[in-house]
C-alpha cells in the first residue's frame, strides 16, 4: 500500500510509488513529520519480517520490522544502486535482489558481497502503532575493506595538515 500524509491532516491518500521522479516499483509511504527533521508512519499492519519503503525528506528509506523492533536504512544498494525494498528481509539482513549483497539493518554494514560500502542508517522510535524516522542519517557510513579504509585514512591525514 502506498500512502502519503498532507500538511493539513493525517488522512492517507494513494500515491504512485514515485519519489523525486524515480519509480522504484515499490510502495512508497510519505507522512507528515511529527518533529522537526522526522517523519511518522503507521506500522500497525506491519508484521515481523515485513519492510516498507518510506519517503523521508525526498529520500527513500527502508523501514524494517525485525522481531517487533524497527530499523531504517537507505533503500539503495551501495553496489548495484537497486532498490532494496524489492529484496528479502532475512532476520536482520536485507538482501539486494540484483547480486545478493546483504546488509545488516541495525548498522547498515554489508554482511555479504559484492557490496563493500555500508548503507546510511536512520534513527527510529516506535510505540507499536507508529514509527518516527529521523530525516538525517545517524552517522555517515564507514568504509569497509582495505582499499576503502586506506582511502579514508589518507583523506583524514590530508585534512589534518
Image (cartoon, rainbow, N blue to C red):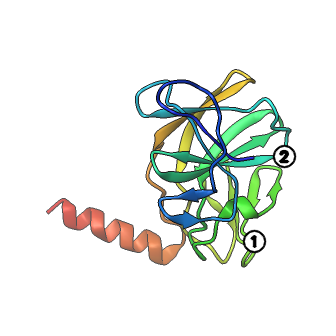
Spatial distance from mark 2 to mark 1, Cα to Cα? 16 Å
* Front residue (pair 34, 10): 10
Secondary element under disc 1, as helix, strand or loop, is loop
Task: Tell me what residue is drawn at x 54 percent, y 43 percent.
Answer: 122
Q: Is residue 153 above or below residue 60?
A: below
The reply to whether callout 2 and callout 1 are in contact (CB within 8 Å) is no
Task: Tell me what residue is drawn at x 44 percent, y 53 percent.
Answer: 140
| Residue 39, image x, y percentages | 53, 34
Q: In which quarter of the image is residue 31?
A: top right
Task: Tell me what residue is drawn at x 45 percent, y 45 percent.
Answer: 57
Q: Residues within 10 Å of mark 1 (few under 14, many from 20)?
A: some
The mark that comes first in sequence, 2 or 1, is: 2
| Residue 22, image x, y percentages | 54, 66
Specify whether 11 is left or right of 52.
left
Residue on which the image places disc 1: 97
Q: Residues within 10 Å of mark 2 (few under 14, many from 20)?
A: some
Figure label count: 2
Residue on which the image places disc 2: 49
- Outermost top residue: 127
Secondary element under disc 2, as helix, strand or loop, is loop
Specify whether 68 is left or right of 125.
right
Q: Which quadrant: the C terminus?
A: bottom left
| Residue 98, image x, y percentages | 72, 77
* Front residue (pair 76, 113): 76
Task: Tell me what residue is drawn at x 50 percent, y 75 percent.
Answer: 146
- Outermost left residue: 161
The answer to whether residue 107 shows anywhere in this view is no
| Residue 134, image x, y percentages | 50, 36
Amino acid at each position: 500500500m502506498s500512502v502519503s500524509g498532507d500538511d493539513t491532516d493525517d488522512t492517507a491518500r494513494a500515491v504512485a510509488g514515485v519519489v523525486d521522479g524515480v519509480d522504484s516499483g515499490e510502495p512508497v509511504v510519505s507522512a507528515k513529520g511529527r518533529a522537526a527533521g522526522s517523519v511518522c508512519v503507521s506500522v500497525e499492519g506491519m508484521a515481523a519480517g515485513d519492510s516498507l519503503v518510506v519517503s523521508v525528506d525526498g529520500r527513500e528509506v527502508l523501514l524494517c520490522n525485525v522481531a517487533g523492533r524497527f530499523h531504517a536504512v537507505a533503500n539503495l544498494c551501495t553496489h548495484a544502486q537497486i532498490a532494496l525494498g524489492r529484496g528479502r528481509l532475512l532476520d536482520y539482513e536485507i538482501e539486494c535482489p540484483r547480486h545478493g549483497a546483504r546488509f545488516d539493518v541495525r548498522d547498515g554494514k554489508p554482511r555479504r558481497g559484492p557490496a563493500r560500502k555500508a548503507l546510511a542508517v536512520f534513527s527510529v522510535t516506535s510505540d507499536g502503532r507508529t514509527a518516527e524516522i529521523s530525516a538525517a542519517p545517524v552517522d555517515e557510513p564507514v568504509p569497509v575493506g582495505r582499499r576503502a579504509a586506506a582511502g579514508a585514512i589518507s583523506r583524514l591525514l590530508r585534512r589534518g595538515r
